[in-house]
Amino acid sequence: SIPLTFFAGIGGASHAGVLVKGSNYLDLLSRAKYVVMDKTGTLTEGVFQVTKIVTSDISEAELLEKTAMAEVFSNHPISKSLKEAYGKPIDSSKVVDVQEVAGAGIKANVDGLEVAAGNEKLMSSLGLSINSVNEPGTVIHVAIAGQYKGYILISDKLKSTSKEAIQALKKAGVKKTVMLTGDSKQVADIVAADLGLDQVYSELLPADKVTKVEELLELKQSKEQLIFVGDGINDAPVLSRADIGVAMGALGSDAAIEAADIVLMDDDPKKIAKAIGIARKCMRIVY
Ligand code: ADP
Ligand code: MG
C-alpha cells in the first residue's frame, strides 16, 4: 500500500505552488540530475523591447505596422512585444491565412500582402538569403510580398532570480544545467555565460529540442532523472519526452500544462530547486 505521507507530500508541494500530477513524479524529481531549460519565458522575462528598426524601401513605422498586424493572432512573447511596440489597435479582419511556424516565426496575408516575420530559418524557407545581423538581441527579419524589407531588433532581460536559480540547482547536486533555445547563438551564448549554465544549444526547432533531450537521456545513468522546464509555448513535445516535464507559470499554454508532469504556479526559476528539495524531503519521509 502507498504510505499516507506520499499524499501529504503532494499536498505540501501544492502549498508551495508545485502541482504534481502523480506521486511517482515526486520520487523521480527527488533524483533529478539533469535540468534542461527553455530560455524565453523560463530564464528570461519573455518581455521584449524594440531597440532598433532597420529597413530598406519602406518606412520604419510601416515595417512595424505590417509586422504587428501579421502577429495579431499569436500569443508568442515576441508577438506580444511587437504589438505592444506598435501600440495601436489592429483591425484583425485585414489579416488572413495566418501560419505560425514554431521556432521560426509567422506568415500572414496582411491587407492583401504576404508578410513574413521571424528568424533566418524562416527567411531561407522563403528562398530569401540575408546577411547575418551582428547586433546584441533577437533579430526579427521581415519580408513583404517576397521581398526582404529589413529587421526589428528586440531584446529580452534575464529574470532577476535566474542566476541564483542555477546556483541553487548546483547546490542541490544537479550534475548538468542545460539551456535549449530557438533563439540565435549570439543571444543564447550571452545568457548561458551570464547564468553559468553548463551547456547551451541554440537555433533549435521544437523537434530539435526533443532530439537534444534524447541525446542527454542517453548520457545519464538509469537512476538519474532528467527534467525539462519550459514556459509552454511550443514546448509540449519536449515536456513529454523528458523523464519529468515541468511547465512553469500559471499562464503557460493549455497544451503545456496538459503535457507536463509538474506545474510550477509562478514564474520564478528558483522554484525548480525548491521543488527538488520538497521532493527529497517527502521521499525521506516515505522511506
Ligand atoms: P525559445 O526556444 O527561446 O522559447 P521559440 O522556439 O519560441 O524560442 O522561437 C525561436 C525563434 O523563432 C525566436 O527567437 C524568433 O526568432 C522566432 N519566432 C518564433 N515565434 C515567432 C513569432 N510569433 N514572430 C516572430 N518570430 C518568431
Ligand atoms: Mg519558448
Image (cartoon, rainbow, N blue to C red):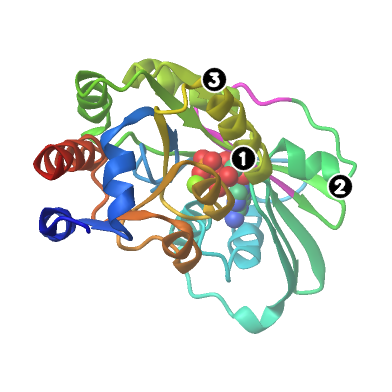
Residue 121 rendering spot, x and y as whole percentages: 75, 39
Q: Where residue 31 sits: x, y (%)?
A: 31, 32
Q: Quadrant of residue 184?
A: top right
The circle on residue 97 is none
Is residue 43 rendered to the left or right of residue 169?
right
> Foreground: 173 or 125?
173
Cα distance in 3D space between marks 2 and 3: 37 Å
Residue under numbered circle 1 = 210
Q: Is residue 135 visible?
A: no
Look at the picture and state if 68 lies above or below 163. below
Q: Is residue 248 above or below residue 108?
A: above
How far separated are the C-alphas under marks 1 and 3? 15 Å
Q: Amino acid at mark 1?
A: Val
Q: Residue at x 73, y 36 (%)?
A: 120
Residue type beneath disc 2: Leu
Front in this rendered view, residue 151 or 205:
205
Q: Which residues are magenta?
A: 132-142
In three-dimensional space, the C-alpha distance between marks 1 and 2, rounded to whole angstroms, equals: 25 Å
The mark lying in front, picked from 1 and 3, is 3
How many marks can you see?
3
- For mark 3, what is the residue? 219
User: Which quadrant holds the C terminus?
Assistant: top left
In the displayed structure image, the side of residue 53 where residue 50 appears, left or right = left
Label 1 vs 3, first from the N-terminus: 1
In the image as oriented, which residue stretches furthest toward the front? 1
Q: Quadrant of residue 34?
A: top left
> Decide: marks 2, 3 in contact (CB < 8 A)?
no
Neighbor class of circle 1 (other Cα within 10 Å; few <14, some 14-19, many 20+) is many
Q: With 246 as the anchor, is 179 left or right in this view? A: right
Q: Secondary structure at mark 2?
A: loop
- Residue ID for mark 2: 126
* Residue 123 at x, y percent in the picture: 79, 42
